[in-house]
């Protein structure tokens, strides 16, 4: 028995099937002493270079890992929704940005800052495709990291924003994400 995992990252990190086959993902790398699980990319499941993201497919026979990841993803979704709802209930409009990354293959780190510019790339039926520029400190080694815009309701994990790089001096930018309009 086996299963597959889909991992969202930047299309500047993994840009074709040849690159996907050479890519490894270290899961649970929270500190130097913590045990990790390594997965290897098999192919690109989907890519959008214009929007700056790709989804890499990995296969595993570790069913316990699949069950654990399924649980953790559901828990994360519940917590993100709870934080967003609490933030909105208190009347906050947010420009707060949080990034979880593993720069240059170091253990996980969390950095925080503010978005300065929101670009709406496309609108359709209450949905906006957006990109942000922000002050949250990162480095080029953080490409593909999850960019969390507090108070924004992302539609699905496939459409989260991920870190792409530096656009203007002092500002980083992210891939196009999909969010609900008028939040």
Image (cartoon, rainbow, N blue to C red):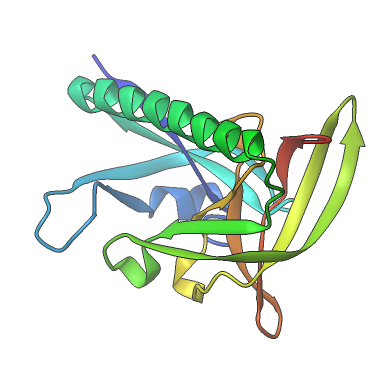
Which residue is painted at 22% across and 24% down in the image? 61
Tell me where residue 169 appears, x and y as whole percent: 70, 85
Tell me where residue 56 appears, x and y as whole percent: 48, 41
Q: On screen, 151 above or below 140? A: above
Q: Quadrant of the C terminus?
A: top right
Q: On screen, 54 above or below 72? A: below
Tell me where residue 148 appears, x and y as whole percent: 56, 50
Which residue is nearer to you in this view: 33 or 113? 113
Disc tally is: 0
Which residue is painted at 82% across and 35% down in the image? 181
| Left or right, 169 with reference to 58 | right
Q: Quadrant of the N terminus?
A: top left
* Res. 11 in view: no
Residue 157, image quadrant: top right
Which residue is nearer to you in this view: 53 or 149? 149
Which residue is nearer to you in this view: 15 or 81? 81
| Left or right, 34 with reference to 87 | left
Q: On screen, 39 above or below 119? A: above
Residue 100, image quadrant: bottom left
Which residue is painted at 51% across and 37% down in the image? 83
Which residue is painted at 28% across and 24% down in the image? 66
| Left or right, 145 with reference to 172 | left
Residue that sits furthest to the front in the current view: 90
Tell me where residue 14 appears, x and y as whole percent: 52, 55
Which residue is nearer to you in this view: 18 or 2? 2
* Res. 160 in view: yes
Residue that sits furthest to the top in the current view: 1
Residue 178, image quadrant: top right
């Amino acid at each position: 028995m086996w299963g597959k995992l889909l991992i969202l990252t930047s299309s500047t990190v993994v840009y074709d099937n040849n690159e996907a086959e050479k890519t490894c993902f270290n899961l649970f790398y929270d500190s130097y002493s913590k045990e990790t699980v390594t997965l290897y990319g098999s192919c690109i499941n989907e890519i959008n270079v214009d929007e700056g993201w790709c989804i890499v497919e990995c296969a595993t026979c570790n069913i316990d890992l699949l069950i654990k990841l399924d649980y953790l993803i559901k828990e994360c979704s519940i917590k993100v929704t709870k934080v967003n709802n609490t933030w909105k209930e208190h009347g906050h409009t947010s420009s707060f940005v949080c990034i979880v990354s593993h720069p240059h293959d170091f253990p996980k780190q969390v950095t925080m800052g503010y978005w300065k510019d929101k670009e709406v790339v496309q609108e359709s039926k209450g949905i906006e495709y957006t990109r942000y520029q922000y002050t949250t400190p990162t480095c080029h080694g953080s490409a593909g990291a999850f960019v969390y815009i507090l108070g924004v309701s992302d539609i699905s994990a496939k459409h989260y924003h991920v870190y792409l790089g530096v656009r203007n001096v002092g500002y980083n930018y992210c891939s196009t994400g999909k969010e609900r309009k008028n939040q």
